[in-house]
Amino acid sequence: MKAICKLSPGPGAEYTDCDVPVINKDELLLRVDHAAICENDLAIYNWTGWAPDRVKTPMIFGHELCGEVVEMGQLDKGFNKGDFVSVESHIFCGLCYQCRNDQRHVCANVRMIGIDTPGGFAEYAAVPARCAWKHTDDSLKDIGAIMEPFGNAVYGVLAEDIVGKTVLISGCDPQGLFGIGIARAGGAKNIIALDSSAYRQKLAKKAGAGHVLDPQSEDIFTKIKHAAKSPDGVDTVIEMSGDPKAIGLGLSVLRYGGRFTAFGMPGKKIELDYAKDIISKGIRLYGVAGREIFRSWYKMESILKSNAVDPRPIITHTFKFKDFKKAFELVGSKEKKCGKVILTP
Ligand SMILES: [Zn+2]
Ligand SMILES: [Zn+2]
């Protein structure tokens, strides 16, 4: 089969011939329908950040995928050939303390598809059946690969009730853009989005943000409070960017007693005013790792099937696997002239 594979440590990857995976008895073999590119894939492609320490080559990457079941392991009950599935990228062990306490998303022994095990930028992928989400009809097939990142936004935004709240979405990468729609559907009163990319600012407007601001513009602190129509600040911050400055800004514009969802990962340790911005303000801080397995998936299915949020306008580009270099150039470009980018076999 053809796959996008990182053959050796260092920047880049190859579109190359690989063996079709041989499945274990608890795995499914999928014929990949499409896969999506995430910032984590960019780190693997560019060989930056955490990637060199974690990824063992050769590795087929890609962890946001969907496809049709073509083979089942002997232990896999509940799946049939022809089933269409999206994939939960966190391979949870099922046995650790967290897994046994309904916290599979923070499994102590988690491995990630496309990072620790061969992934979805391939014609075929082997995935544990317990990580497969079966579609019950065809309505979400065309967006099957973006359910994984959409789930991040569902978990992050809906970690608390947002009805009537002023919500700041900090960072309009695809998860941030999904988050705008989810906040809107969830009943937020006022949504303020932050991003420096003009392209993504437009997408944020389209997704339903009432105010879209450039976090690098002058006196942004006052601009946000003005947009929030409150000198106290915003009720909720959904931090998707991971940018240390944006994290500090988000904490500073959050009102006393507000909620801060931390999703975007800074590349290094950052400095916070812990006493002033967290303790004294009495905020609730949620770390969001992945999605709740599978609670977030049920919520997602409901949100998407009811058309409360349509994530399709956020998918801006589709490339063939063989053109993956163009796709990664686009996702990695400084101007960020893209929303979600899809790859197809
Ligand atoms: Zn991802
Ligand atoms: Zn576990």
Image (cartoon, grey):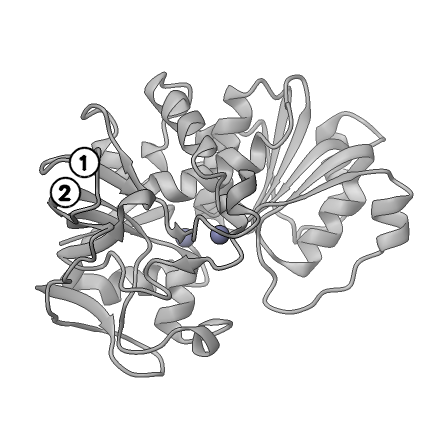
Determine which residue is flagged by label 1: 79
- What's the residue type where badge 2 is placed? Val
Q: Residue at x 18, y 26 (%)?
A: 138
Q: Is residue 278 left or right of residue 124?
A: right
- What's the residue type where badge 1 is placed? Phe
Callout 1: few (<14), some (14-19), or many (20+) C-alpha neighbours within 10 Å? some
* Label 2 CB-ligand 1 distance < 8 A: no
Q: Residue at x 58, y 27 (%)?
A: 210
Viewer-closest of 93 and 246: 93
Say whether marks 2 and 1 touch (CB < 8 Å).
yes
Checking the image for residue 296, the label placed there is none
Query: Could you tell me if residue 215 is visible in this image?
Result: yes
Q: Residue at x 49, y 45 (%)?
A: 104
- At which x and y percent is residue 193? 59, 38
* Label 1 CB-ligand 2 distance < 8 A: no
Query: Could you tell me if residue 103 is visible in this image?
Result: no
Closer to the chain start, of discs 2 and 1, is: 2
Quarter of image, res 123:
bottom left
Viewer-closest of 94 and 250: 94
- Mark 1 element type: loop
Callout 2: few (<14), some (14-19), or many (20+) C-alpha neighbours within 10 Å? many
Q: CA distance from mark 2 to mark 1?
A: 8 Å
Query: In the figure, 344 relative to 50: above or below?
Result: above
- At which x and y percent is residue 323? 18, 62
Determine which residue is flagged by label 2: 69
Query: In the figure, 5 relative to 64: above or below?
Result: below
Quick one: quadrant of the C terminus? bottom left
- At which x and y percent is residue 75? 21, 45
Query: In the figure, 229 relative to 15: above or below?
Result: above
Quick one: quadrant of the N terminus? bottom left
- At which x and y percent is residue 102? 53, 38
